[in-house]
Amino acid sequence: MTIGTNDTGFSSLAKVLSEQGLEGLGSAVEILINEAMKIERAKHINAKLYERSELRSGYANGFKPKQLNTRIGALNLQVPQVRNSDFYPSFLERGLRSERALSLSLAEMYIQGVSTRKVGAILEEMCGFEVSSQDVSRASKLLDEEFIKWRERPLGQYVYLILDARYEKVRQGGQVIDSAVLIAYGVDCFGARHVLGLSILLSEAEVHWRKFLEGLVTRGLHGVQLITSDAHSGLKSALKAVFPSVPWQRCQFHLQQNAQSYVPKQSMKKEVAEDIRTIFNTPNKVEADRQLSLMISKYEKTAPKLSAWMENSIPEGLTVFNFKVSHRVRLRTTNLAERVNREIKRRTNIVNIFPNVASCERLITGILIEISEGWGNEQTYLSMKD
């Protein structure tokens, strides 16, 4: 099946992605185009690389680098050469005339979780003829290798670590299961933010969080001075095991939300929310502790469960007072992660239910690569000057 520019099966979101959302996926696009050109050369000379064939009509002669500037970024391609031949890949001959069809196809592919069927359709769009299942399999494998390389890349020193989890519906063993997607973000010593990694398993149990965090350390993560997260199930125990000496900041936004469960009357909720904000917005730790003490006493009789919850939980949201004033506003919550979650949700809602974990992992990896590379083009997230 060849996908063209008039394919009505593409959603409006696919068009948006093709025009705005593929800038960070250049490496994956390069893989597909380079593979398509190698497939076309093999067809041109009637022989695959190193294949002995009586039907051979020419010989491969290496590759010539070429940069192709497109709306999805500059692509660094390796154009196949043929000895004593004027062979030139048809995709490059068509140039930007086929770019929109390619962009739409790529957008649809990532929406669908980079399925094998979509990879095959895109290779056919590039080559202009039907490709074999072996060609599709090889291209899919190269895409997976590129994503795995990114997920397992070496890390270094990151001053701040932000952790978050979300859930996606994945079909496993004939059932649709909510699978936990763990994502780690870091701010380096220059103040730049990065996506450090992700992991997808059935739950947020301690063993999942611990394995994920240990993987970050194995990849070289060090120098962490503060970890910000919500109180996810299993996370606190995993943090004590992997980062026992690193201070933990519980997300203040989620703390305010959690507090509402302990408010006995609807009429009290606004007042309680304002009181908690007063604690969080104080200028220093001493004043925050004083305000907390006042609030604990204030609600001791009218809302005893709230008072007890405040005494046990609010201090977990005050760790950030031990850090630079200019950093507090971005370290006291997981807002950085929440913004990324909204983008992930926008894309994954189209899929709704993933056919397997690998498909879910591919799509979210592609989204995170795109976001992380976009962050690399911005000014620093935090000023690290004294």
Image (cartoon, rainbow, N blue to C red):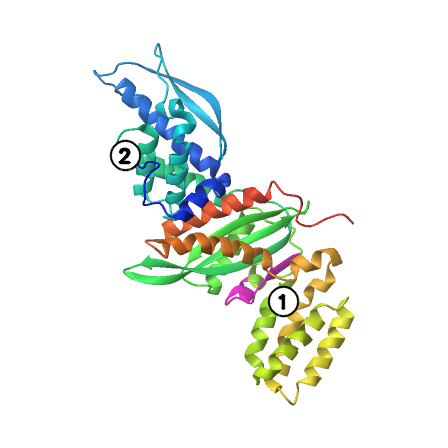
Name the foreground residue: 157 vs 138.
138
Q: Residue at x 51, y 50 (%)?
A: 197
Closer to the camera: disc 1 or disc 2?
Answer: 1
Q: Is 231 contained in the magenta span?
A: yes
Q: Which residues are magenta?
A: 226-238
How crowded is the residue under tag 1: few (<14 C-alpha within 10 Å), some, or many (20+)?
A: many
Q: Position of residue 304 (x, y in %)?
A: 62, 86
Q: Upstream in the sequence, badge 1 or badge 2?
A: 2
What residue is shown at x 55% (from left), y 55% (from top)? Answer: 339
The verdict on residue 348 being magenta is no
Q: Residue at x 35, y 29 (%)?
A: 36
User: Residue 386, percent across and down?
Assistant: 78, 49
**Given the image, on which type of amino acid does mark 2 rest?**
Gln
Query: Where, quadrant-wise, is the N terminus in this rendering?
Result: top left
Relative image position of residue 174 (x, y in whole percent): 27, 60
Q: Amino acid at mark 1?
A: Gln
Verify CB contact (< 8 Å) between mark 1 and mark 2.
Answer: no
Tell me if I can see residue 362 in this picture: no
At mark 1, the secondary structure is helix
Near-viewer residue (329 or 356): 329
Looking at the image, can residue 347 be seen?
yes
Residue 305's tag is: none
Image quadrant assignment for residue 107: top left
Q: Would residue 312 appear left or right of 154 to someone viewing this image?
A: right
Q: Hey, which quadrant is residue 175 in on the image?
A: bottom left
Tell me residue 154's x, y (percent): 55, 42
Disc on res. 252: 1
Q: Secondary structure at mark 2?
A: helix
On screen, residue 279 above or below 301: above
Identify the residue at horizontal 41%, vertical 22% (top origin). 79
Q: Above or below — where is 88 with respect to 69?
A: above
Which residue in the protein does label 2 denote? 134
